[in-house]
Image (cartoon, helix red, strand yellow):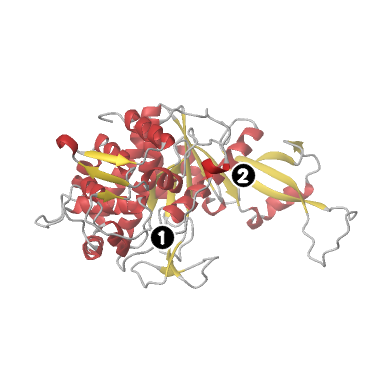
Amino acid sequence: MKLSRFDVRTKAHALPELNFENETLTSFGGLIIFQKFFSAIHLRARLGTCFRHLASGKVFDRGAVFLQLIVHLLLGYRELQDCRHYRDDPLVKRFLGMKRIPDVATLSRMLKEANPKLVAKLRQLLRNLVLERVMSLALARITLDFDGSVQSTRRHAEGTAVGFNKKKKGARSYYPLFGTVAQTGQVLDFLHRPGNVHDSNGAKAFILQCVDEVRAAARGAVIENRLDSAFFSDEIVTALDERRSEFTISVPFGRFVELKSMIESRRRWRRLSKDVSYFEASWKPQKWDKRFRFLFVRTRVKKQHKGPIQLDLFVPHEHGYEFKVIVTNKTVRAKTVVAFHEGRGSQEAIFAELKSHCHQDYVPTRTLCGNQTYLLAGLFAYNLTRELQMQTTKVSRSTTAKRASLWAFERLDNIRKTIIQRAGRMSRPHGTLTLTISANRWLQTRILHLLGAIPADA
């Protein structure tokens, strides 16, 4: 259909007059999807069990206050004081089951009252939700990635310390170690640590705990692990091998003269691709008891020119090699092992989304358990958004060599902007509670599809 300029253009010079009334208007119409989803998985009741050991008698139920923190982060707010922006929103009130939304003092008090027992229970619930999804998929292989991520702060918060920090040198920080599931793109668990510890601090027990819990939940599945060079040690390698858990770990070969000599003396390299070649050897450091399979990989790259730039198109590029070494107990082809290990880079995207859109780079209180509780609220918001997509869409990928997630997930900020942040009006025509949202055909189709796809009792 061809449109004329008269059909398209209009005059819009005058500003409308402003009028503020106590209407039942909401800025978050799409939150109704999460309301149904949280009800389907009984999230409120399960959170309540985590807070049951604390003294009762409070006006605001602590489980509901923690649920508010999850919603707070889903809506895109960062600091606790930002709760004032939605304190009169009728849909948020109904979502939380409250006539009055807790203010910043109540949120802060709940975080300060948090204790290690509460943190442990919330961590267990986080793990259980992920393991339930893993069990429902009946996967033949489950891939766990482990790495740390820095949480910097200007506060002198309990448990923080000055450590290595590329972006904020000298800042106090936490350095939690995260375990993620590659197939679902969710965070399974975390180990909270001060910012001045090495990556491997406490890593062995944490990694083995994650492996054991996944194995207990998904009996018969092969558990795979991917780690960087900070976790290369006889203890971790041997422990994973004894548990018959497959692994690939980057090797800090600069520490071992023998490995460097093996690379320098090697003449024949087998080709993996145009620019990548390899060789492998059975080797062990002197103090180790058992030999393992080591893959030596070199990649042909362009050398960086650090001198003055010459605008001459005919200057030939010089090429050199970058080397890396991988230790593994996998028995498949070298090409498959290298591709599998390179897939661990997907974990960086998880950390980026957690920090940018779940505000995991924010430290709200001075207490250790309070900050761990806030971190958990962000992890719940992130994991539950992924779980919603898995429940309402079909698997879009098969298992790949790099173990990419089985779904092509939307980022939380995209869901927030396109679905959650939709203006609406709450009314009761003929006594029926109704949420009226702008008649956008795409939005209507999307919301109705999501609501219809969520099972009544997940």
Q: Foreground: 118 or 21?
A: 21
Question: Can see residue 271?
Answer: yes
Question: Residue drawn 47% across and 58% down?
Answer: 13
Kind of residue indicated by mark 1: Leu
Instruction: Give the side of residue 127 with respect to residue 276, left or right.
Output: left
Exactly how many numbered labels are in the figure?
Answer: 2
- The answer for how far apart the CA atoms under marks 2 and 1 are is 65 Å
Residue most toward the right?
A: 314
N-terminal of the two: label 2 or label 1?
Answer: 1
Q: How far across and down, in percent of the image, does residue 190 sit?
A: 39, 51
Q: Decide: is 375 above or below 418.
A: below
Secondary structure state at the residue bearing disc 1: loop
- For image coordinates 60% across by 30% down, the residue present is 332
Q: Name the quadrant of the N terminus.
A: top right
- Which picture quadrant has residue 39? top left
Kind of residue at badge 2: Ile
Q: Nearer the viewer, residue 101 or 372?
A: 101
Residue hosting label 1: 15
Q: Residue 410, relative to residue 82: is it above or below?
A: above
Counting from the top left corner in percent of width and height, residue 191 is at 38, 53
Q: Nearer the viewer, mark 2 or mark 1?
A: 1
For residue 408, side relative to residue 321 (left or right)? left
Which residue is rendered at x = 84% and y = 53% of the image? 317
Q: Secondary structure at mark 2?
A: strand
The residue labelled by disc 2 is 326
Location of the C terminus by quadrant is: top left
